[in-house]
Image (cartoon, rainbow, N blue to C red):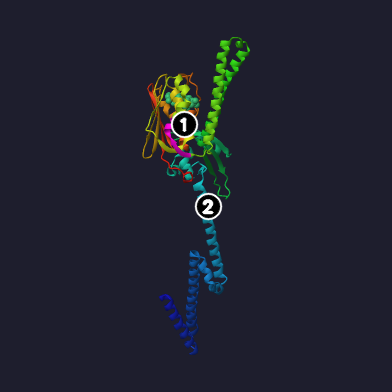
Amino acid sequence: MSFRAFVFLLGGGAFVAGGVFMLLAGHGMARLILFAGLFLFLYLLVRLIYRIVARQADAALKNPLTIAAQGFFDDLFDPMLSGLIRLLKEKHETSGRLAEVASRFEGVFENMVEGVVVTASNSQILMVNPAFERILAIPASEAVGNRLGIVVRETAIHQLVEEVFRTKNRVMRELGYRSRGAAKVLNVVATISEPRDGSGKSYGIFLFYDMTTIRGLERIRKDFVANVSHEIRTPLTSIRGYAEALSDGALADPELAKSFLGIISTSADRLSRLVNDLLELSRLESGTVDLRLAPIELGSLSDRLREEFSDRLSQKEMRLETDFSRPFTFVSDESLLHLVLVNLLDNAIKYSSPGSSLRLGATMGESGVQIEVEDRGMGIPEEELPRIFERFYRVDRSRSPAVPGTGLGLSIVRHVMTLLSGRVAVKSALGKGTTVSLHLPSRSLPSSSL
Ligand SMILES: Nc1ncnc2c1ncn2[C@@H]1O[C@H](COP(=O)(O)OP(=O)(O)OP(=O)(O)O)[C@@H](O)[C@H]1O
Ligand SMILES: [Mg+2]
């Protein structure tokens, strides 16, 4: 009990006792004194009720569970206290629900893949999410508080902002955007939210989708179809042309007929090689190729390759030199490595002049095996090196139009090396020659095959 309450209690008691005494003595002021005492008691009682209510309210704000534990007061001061407590409980629950909704909204807003910008009706940015910062490479600190059309310095976005606020219609547009030197394709959807709460405020909502990867893939697919069609059409046209020429009379001239048939046969070869390479690439890309790991002896593999290329080598008066100690054994997938070496030797022979040398070298290192295919052929210009592994890419088609090829060989090599967890690198000097190095990681045999 506080000192003040104690004084009031003492004073009230004294007054009441004095009043009763004076009443008994028949004193005229007795009633007044008695009333004063009772007033002091009443004041104390009101203060007590006020304190209990305040303490309950305080507890209810901090933790509504404590209210249940003090049900005694609910009964005592009902309906005033329990009404107040119910009010507080509801307020507590409502603010809990609001906090939950807010945190859910925040979770969605923060983790959306699409960039979101909310602006006031004058296009001043009120909030942006992390995806917006990432896609447009603009930090929130630079965006919030400024106008959208100024923050995103792109004329098309400027126009889109202007249009959506003028027409109040949903506007959707795909546009190009440069962020830190990189060109992006963005799909922007803009809407105006109409005021619902009578506050009269409307907001601009802008969604940014990054379409760069999707559009890039579409371009690759289109290029691929265009390239395949071109590669098919060229030999088909010559097959058709020479076949027509034969039937139109060239057949009567045996010399001419022989040369036309030779062209038809080369074109058919070209077509079948193209189909085989495409099938090979799609098999490698399908992810269904199982590695068959086994010990490989590079000496016998190179003997086999020398045999397979014997005609081509002798036509070009070339010899395949090997440069590694025998036996040279390591673990990898022999048929996949064979596919890689066939493509590399094919290039080395194709892009070399007759009589030039050709070397297949290998060294065993700590991290794995290094295999090199080295030729002294025409070489590759330095600026072309980054592109030679692309599908259908051929260095300057005009420099060797007579050299057959579709530009798929090295992209098959790159795919296989990825499957083998290896690497491929090319060094070349124009007019001097080319060295392709393969690095294969050291492997041990899976325990099932031991
Ligand atoms: N050893 C090499 N010497 C010179 N140029 C090369 C060599 N290897 C590859 N190139 C260049 O790289 C390009 C791509 O090679 P890639 O093997 O992918 O295609 P290709 O040989 O033209 O056709 P394909 O292999 O499908 O028959 C070639 O067109 C050629 O210009
Ligand atoms: Mg090739």
Question: Which mark sits nearer the N-terminus, 2 or 1?
Answer: 2
**Distance from label 2 to label 1 (Cα)?**
54 Å
Q: Percent x, y for residue 140?
A: 44, 44
Question: Closer to the observer: label 2 or label 1?
Answer: 1
Mark 2 element type = helix
In the picture, the quarter occupied by the N terminus is bottom left
Say few, some or many: other residues with alpha carbon within 10 Å of mark 1 (under 14 / 14 to 19 / 20 or more). Answer: many
Towards the viewer: 41 or 207: 207
Which is nearer the eye, 292 or 236?
Answer: 292
| Residue 342 drawn above or below residue 113 | above
Element class at badge 1: helix
Using the image, determine if residue 428 lies above or below residue 213.
above
Which amino acid lies under the numbered mark 2 shown in the image of this protein?
Answer: Arg
Residue 393, can we see it?
Answer: no
Instruction: Magenta stretch: give its range.
Output: 293-302
Question: Mark 2 — residue?
Answer: 104
The tag on residue 340 is 1
- Dot 2 and dot 1 residues touching (CB under 8 Å): no
Residue lying at the far right of the rendered structure:
247
Q: Give percent across and percent down for residue 128.
A: 48, 44
Kindly indicate the quadrant of the structure image that contains residue 375: top left
Please say whether residue 279 is visible from this viewpoint.
yes
